[in-house]
Every structure is written in C-alpha cells, then in structure tokens.
Image (tube, rainbow, N blue to C red):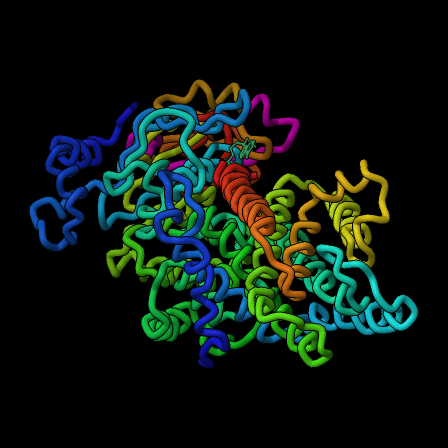
Amino acid sequence: MPELTVPTLRELPLRILPPALLRTGRYGLGGRGSAHLVERHARVYRRTWGVLISGFVEPLFYLLSIGIGLGKLVGTVTGPGGHVIGFTSFVAPALLATSAMNGAVLDSTFNVFFRLKYAKLYDSTLATPMRADEIALGEIGWALIRGSLYATAFMAVMLALGLVHSAWALLDVPVAILIGFAFAGAGMAGTTFMRSWQHFEFITLSTLPMFLFSTTFYPLGVYPRPVQMFIEVTPLYQGIVLLRGLTLGIVGPGLLPRVGYLVIMGIAGLIVAGRRIQRLLLA
Amino acid sequence: MDMPAEGASGHTEAAGRLPEEQETYEGLSVPAGMVCDVAEREVLIRARGLTKVFGQFRAVDGIDFELTRGEVFGFLGPNGAGKSSTMRMIGCVSPPSGGELRIFGLDPVNDGPSIRARLGAVPQEDTLDVELTVRENLLIYGRYFGLRRDVIKERTARLLDFVQLAERADDQVEPLSGGMKRRLTIARSLISEPEILLLDEPTTGLDPQARHVVWDRLYRLKQQGVTLVLTTHYMDEAEQLCDRLVVMDRGKIAAEGSPRELIAAHSTPEVLELRFRIDEQEQAVEKLADLPDVRIEVLADRILVYTADGDAALADVGRCGLEPLTSLIRRSSLEDVFLRLTGRRLED
Ligand SMILES: Nc1ncnc2c1ncn2[C@@H]1O[C@H](COP(=O)(O)OP(=O)(O)O)[C@@H](O)[C@H]1O
Ligand SMILES: [Mg+2]
C-alpha cells in the first residue's frame, strides 16, 4: 500500500491550536481524530488531484488579466498610508486573500454538504470513537492544507513577478491560512444549517460582493463614508488589509485587531459546526 | 418485565447481583480474561426503562434487557418496532430520552467515544465510503479508531478473506452487489476487534443466496465467541443465530428467552396449517373453535391450529366433517410466538 503523500501535513490540525484548547468537557475544538479525516481526504484526492489545480490557476488568471493587463492602463494607486504603488502590487495581495477565502468556502460548504447529506460520510465516522468536533476540525484542517498549497504557489508567482516588497511577506502564507480558517469555520457552520443546494446561492451572494468591493481593485477612498464603514467590518477586508500591509511592508499594530477578528471568526465557526453536527447526526 | 423463560432469568439475575463488583471491574478496565470468576456472566450492556422519544412518539418505550459477554442476543420485531432506535442508542449515536443505559459500565452520553472504541456497528443502511476502494474502506475506518496502519493492514487481509472479498480489495465500492456491500460493512465493523458487534438487520434486502453467505459468516463469528447483538424481522434468522432474544413490538418488549424457551412458553409443540375454499373458511373456523385442546389463529389465506399433537388434531378435523384443500403439520416457530403475543405477523 503506498504511503500518504503528505505525512507531515497530516498532523497540521493539531498544531493550529494549542492542546489545552482542544477539549473542554463533552465538546471540544477537535483532536487527534481530526487528522484521520484529513488522511481520508488526502487519499481520495490523491486519485483526483487534477481538481486541486483549479484552486491555483483561478487567482493566477485574475492576476495576469486584471492585475497586469489593467495595471498597464491604471498605472499606480494610492495604497495603505498614502503610499503610491503600482496597480499590480496593489491587487496581488488582495487576490491572494480572495483565493484563500474562495478555496476555504468551497471546501467547507459544497464538499461538506455533500458528505453530510448525500455521502453520509459522517454517519459512519461517528460510529467510531471520532467526535463531531473532530470532524469539524478535520474538515477545516483539510481546507487549510489545500489553501496553504495554493497560497504558497501564488506567493511564488508574486515573488517571480517582483510583487513582493518586504520581508514581512514571509507572513503572507500563514495569514492566508488564517483567512482560510476564518472562512472555513464560518462556511462549515453555515452549511450545517442548509437544507438544499438552493441555499448555496447565499454563499455566492456573500463572497462575490466581498471579492469585488473589499478594496480588491481600488482603495477604500472611492466609496462614500457609510459604504466604507460597511466594508470595514467585512471579513475579507480584514484579510486584504493584512496581506497588503505585509506584502508592501507597511505594517503597524493596527493590523493586530484584524488578526483577532479572523481568529475569533474561525474558532466560533469551528465550535458551531461541531455542535451542529453533533445535533444533526447524534440525535 | 414478563420473564417467561426461567433459565434465562436465572442467568441474568446472577449477574445482576454483582453490580458493585461489576462497576469496579469496568472502572479499572481490566481485560476480561483476568477476572475469570466474573467473565463467566459478565454483563456488558444493561438497560432499565430505556426510552427513545421522537417528538410525541415513543419509538422505544421503557425496555429492560441485559447482554452478557459471549452470547448472541437478538431483537426480533416487525418494522417500526423500535429495533433500530434501540441499536442506535446502544451504538452511542443516539442519546436515550429516558431510562438507564450502561455499556461496559459506562454512560453512552458522556463516554460515547470510549464506548464506541469497543463496539463494532453494522447499521441498517450500509454507510460505506464510496470515494474509497474496498481496502481503503477498512484502512480509513481503522484509522478512525486510531489503529496503526500496519495493524490495519494485517487485519484487512484476514477480514477480506473472511468475508470473501479478497479479490475485490482494490475495487471501488459502488459496483459491489448488495450482499458484498453488507459483507464489507461487517468486515469494516470488525477492524477494531470489537468486544460487541451490533448488527441491525444484517440480511434485510438480500436475496436468499446472499443471506445464507452472511448467515454463515455470522455463525462463524458466533462460534469464535464474539458477542453479537442483532435485530431482525426474520424469525429463521433469530432462531438460527440467537442464544437469547427479546420479542419487540411497538417500542416494548413482549417476551424474552431463548428461541426454544419462547416457543415452549408461548406456543404449542406443533401447528396444523389448513387451507379451505374461501366460501368454506368461515364455517370451518366455527367448527375448529370447538375442537378440544387447540387454539386457532385465522390468517387471510389459512387457519393455524395450535396443538400438542398435529396428527390427532388433523383426525379431529376430519371427524367434524371438514375437508381442507391442503393440510400441513409443522413445528412451532418464533413466527407463532410473535403472532400469539401481538396478534400480528412478523413479516410484511
Ligand atoms: N429520527 C426519527 N425521527 C422520527 N421518528 C423516527 C425516527 N427514527 C425512527 N422513528 C420512528 O420510530 C419508530 C421505530 O423506528 P425504528 O427504531 O427504526 O424501528 P425498526 O428498526 O424496528 O423498524 C418508527 O415508527 C419510526 O418511524
Ligand atoms: Mg430498523
């Protein structure tokens, strides 16, 4: 039997959270069992690895067409802290954030819904010592492993195109994973409330506008103040500000609350998802 | 609870007198073999007034039972009797709504994962992982139990042989026949070498040949001393496999005992089955009711005459001037027990 291709990554979910956080009473935030679900997914995707490519090429196409193509027309924009920067450098970190969001949402919604309602995967999983919260963390962990591969590949392209302007960009991949964590948690939690595929319209309805309006292609300043205030509280905006700051080397303590925002969003999603799966399947 | 079967009740009561010892023993989780004295009649599952309510509906309505290590215990009952609901509570995938349930001395609500680690479950509907091959199904399921890959690999080879699926090891699951899927589910449930194997209607929906293969495998497990809990609505399945069973109907236990005890307690040794022309049936029922020492049950297509001596009863039938189209003398079965206890038939 061939060994698993990513043996070190299998244990990743364990390292995302300190062990003390992993279990509180009957519910927890995942545990050892999460890694087994990740192993299961890795096995399935080893045969269908082709689908993994789309997660990488999609943001790349955006970068090449909009970033570089449009960049020729636009030239420069006013970035964080009033710095004037090239359009492509402005857009690239936002595309990284967006792809982290999209990848995480896809994994934690469509795929989870299918496994929950159709493949009945978790019904058999829960007949074993596995707990519902381990399933939740396993799913999120798997989304993050895929996300980290995409983010790393995208970073390599950014580096090659000279779009990385600071050593702070070393934190880009971890932050992209954090963005994935926040959206995977929220996405999975939301999925447990969905009854049919129609409900997935809500997901597109929330991620697409975030992609278009969260200062992906132009600065916040172009909007009237009320709209700005709305955008400032959306999750993707936090991720874009973080990645843009790090990539351009414009970093300050103001970024920390945004990290906290995403951490809390992810953990809240993880808890809700675990408890909902418990309620849905262990009834 | 009505306990007609003296032998069975004496058996379980003996275990019931040792609750403290039992609990301490479970608490320490000493391997079974180390306490020979207790292992004889070690109670693995104890249910008292166990209840499952869905909304207003009482699917399981206050049942009591005990499972002892090494025995094959069955729930026999028609569709909707509450068998699956009971099995899901035992399997710790459905919390009891009321009553008491202890498995290995543990509480299924608080200790679900530790209990499930020691159980094997074959649910009513196969829940195989269709994105994995036959072999991978065992591998991943074993990993869910935290087993090491080399341990799983060794057991997989053995188990696939046991369920006669070795040739299909690297095939996808979807194209397998119903019987093969069932056998694979059984193999999967054995990967963790469970102390109790739960089988919810192991052969329902299989064609006769596939059923016999599954029965044969279960019979071997029984002979190896594996503790089995199974549900079925096939009386032949219950009769062949179960050491002890409860007859379940509408969420309640109607009777308990070994198949032989149940038949002795609730039916007669022989049954005379008579068919009459439709227009003669009513008249025949009246006359048969007057026969001495018999009890009759009228079914849609035939009349059952319960008697100690079928030949004598058939002679009596002739003396009343009745001419059945066909007559058949057979031994009583659990089907007759069920009919007696509930007034209804098991299958259909
Ligand atoms: N999840 C559920 N929600 C509501 N009713 C249920 C549920 N599960 C089972 N029931 C009902 O409980 C009764 C017993 O079901 P079940 O335990 O599956 O019986 P059996 O396995 O003996 O056929 C049935 O009437 C069934 O409709
Ligand atoms: Mg059932």
Q: Quadrant of residue B74?
A: top left
Q: Looking at the image, which residue is at 23% across and 50% down?
A: B70
Specify the farthest residue to the left. Answer: B37
Q: Is residue B56 above or below residue A67?
A: above
Q: Quadrant of residue B64?
A: top left
In percent of width and height, residue B103 lies at 29, 40
Q: Looking at the image, which residue is at 12% across and 31% down?
A: B17
Q: Is residue B171 magenta?
A: no
In percent of width and height, residue B283 lies at 57, 21
Quadrant (top left/top right/bottom left/bottom right) for the N terminus of chain B: top left
Quadrant (top left/top right/bottom left/bottom right) for the C terminus of chain B: top right
Q: Looking at the image, which residue is at 19% across and 35% down?
A: B12
Q: Is residue B325 above or below residue A244?
A: above
- A6 vs A87, nearest the viewer: A87
Q: Looking at the image, which residue is at 61% across and 58% down?
A: A251
In percent of width and height, residue B271 lies at 40, 36
Left/right placement of residue A234 relative to residue B200 reads right
**Residues in magenta, as a range:** B264-284
- A143 vs A227, nearest the viewer: A227
Left/right placement of residue A214 relative to residue A119 reads right
